[in-house]
Amino acid sequence: MFPTSTQKTNWIFKDELDLNALREDANQKFITRFGSHMSPEDRNTFFLDANEEHIIQKCHEYILRDFCHKFQPTMPKYVFATALNYLKRFYLYNSVMDYHPKEIMVTCLFLACKVDEFNVSLAQFVANIKGNQSRATTVILNNELFLMEQIKYNLKVHHPFKAIEGFLLDIKTRTRMSDPDRMRTHIDSFIDKLLFTDACLLFAPSQLALAAVLHSASQIKENLDSYVTDLLLGDTGSEHLKDLIEVVRRIRILHVRIADDHTKELSRISKKLDKCRNQENNPFSEKYKDRIQESLNNSL
Amino acid sequence: MEELACVRCMSSKFRNPNLVFSFNVCGHTMCANCIEVAFMKGSGPCPKCLIPLRRNGFKLQQFEDASVDVEVETRKRILQDFNKTEDDFESLDDYNDYLIEIEDIIYNLVRNINVVETKERIDQYKRENKEIIMRNRMKSKREEQALDDLIEEEKMHTQYKRDEVLRDEAEQRTKKLRVDSELIDSLARSNSDARDIVNTYTHKKEEIPVPKPKPISKPINFTKFSTGVKFNQSSIAISIKEGPLFKYEPVSHQLNGPSCPDITQLDSLGYMKYIRRESSQELAGGFLIKTSCLHYVQECVSALYERKTGKV
């Protein structure tokens, strides 16, 4: 149940300003930690800013989608959605420069597989990764607990998929609309797009589902306004109508705004990231090996 | 020393080596045949000392002198009650006095000295130390149980080891057989030199690894339940805590959204029309599609009025 979930208490924010403030904060923390010896101008050129970080994160979300598409055995959509949610949550409080999204991304997906009961073994999972698989194994195992800690062990994620089924069922039962299943393709594409926005950090899954249903109804030239006002909300809920309209409007804005394409900037930012990332967390660097060695020695 | 003989028929081991002797509380020996005849009714007097005896009181004689057997029996019986240990006494002297008392009692009983008085002593002791006797009996029982368990475990362990070795040997044998049959196959079909083929296969056969004695892991021991209670442990009274009775309160959900139909209303409102029926396998598992249907409907109204106003 969403109303009693950790998702609602910890991971739903008021608006995008809140989210941006958190990201800015994480970015600044990293820069002050590693750039204390630099002049402000150098810092700006050397480190990524919050916006660039966000672009990197966005691009990795699409990489994750492609990875999930090719994944064998075929992966249900909600597993991907959960992983994406973890990724978003993680980078609210952490900088891309500190932990490379490539590593966090696979860890998120592996954790999501477990949480959403999509049963794959680690070996099976890693078999889908091109490149060094044994290294991927260590990366996933090293990061998994850390990731869970960062998302406060709030593992259950509620998605709009179930609510959409609920709405379709409700519409079939209570209205005379002919074949509501016609909306499905539109709903799916709407929700698919929304996954890549911050919508899941701002709105309840039922609200997202409602927005998707209303949007697709307008796409097939049907009107569900009377369904919402008369049947869904009824007499008792009429006071909430204004809020609900506002919420749906905001979700549709999010949906429209998604079109930005960052592929051009990506290569430039990636190069920059390779230089400025925290080498202690880069499994290829000498610093990383030193750190691991040191912690091993300490533990002995 | 006089020869061990039956007090009734006077036959002895010397005359009849197959004779089986038994004795009773009075310490007089009788052969199995005479017991059969004299105690046909189940009880009767001892032919020698005329003490009334019971038939089922006869025990197989293990020592040449029946009086030793009597003493052993008596000792066993007495020690069942006089089972205090050193821990039950404050000082070593007390304990020693207690041991001496036991010996006195046993001596008296065996030699028929002051039997009545001694029996009174025993009864008095039993009355006075009822609790301690019971407790120590339980304790020794448990110790015996633990010993039995240990023996059982050892047995299983050796069994497991033996099985392991046998399995390894069988494996080895099948491997060798397979190599042999391969050799015959290739001899029959291949065109190359027969000697070469034989050579390669002898190498192959040598290469079969001799099974190394593996570090033997302990076999899973099924003498306990998962709770740690042993299978055949005498039931120890479980203390039941009396608390307030559990009272079921139906769960209520704060949906924070429009009202939503109850699970009982789903049918009448027509929701179930659009949902598949559960299969018979699902029904057997206790799955009701109604519950899922309710979840879907709840999911779409829950938190619909959600509005975050403050910062987290």
Image (cartoon, grey):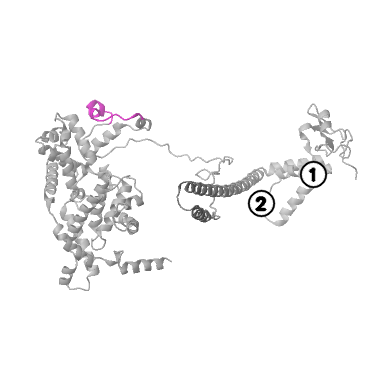
User: Which residue has dot 1 on it?
Assistant: B71
Residue range in magenta is B263-280
Q: CA distance from mark 1 to mark 2?
A: 26 Å
Question: Residue B3: x, y in percent?
Answer: 89, 42
Between B303 and B7, the one lying in front of the other is B7
Residue B282 in sight here? yes
User: Which residue has dot 2 on it?
Assistant: B88
Between A42 and B65, the one lying in front of the other is A42
Residue A299 on the magenta segment = no
Dot 2: chain letter: B
Between A123 and A79, the one lying in front of the other is A123
Q: Which residue shows up at 13% across the image and 47% down it?
A: A255
Dot 1: chain letter: B
Tell me the mark number nearer the camera, choosing from 1 and 2: 1
Question: Residue B230: x, y in percent?
Answer: 55, 43
Q: Which residue shows up at 19% across the image and 29% down it?
A: A173
User: Relative to A40, is B5 above or below?
Assistant: above
Question: Residue B129: x, y in percent?
Answer: 68, 44
Q: Confirm or deny contact between disc 1 and disc 2 (CB under 8 A).
A: no
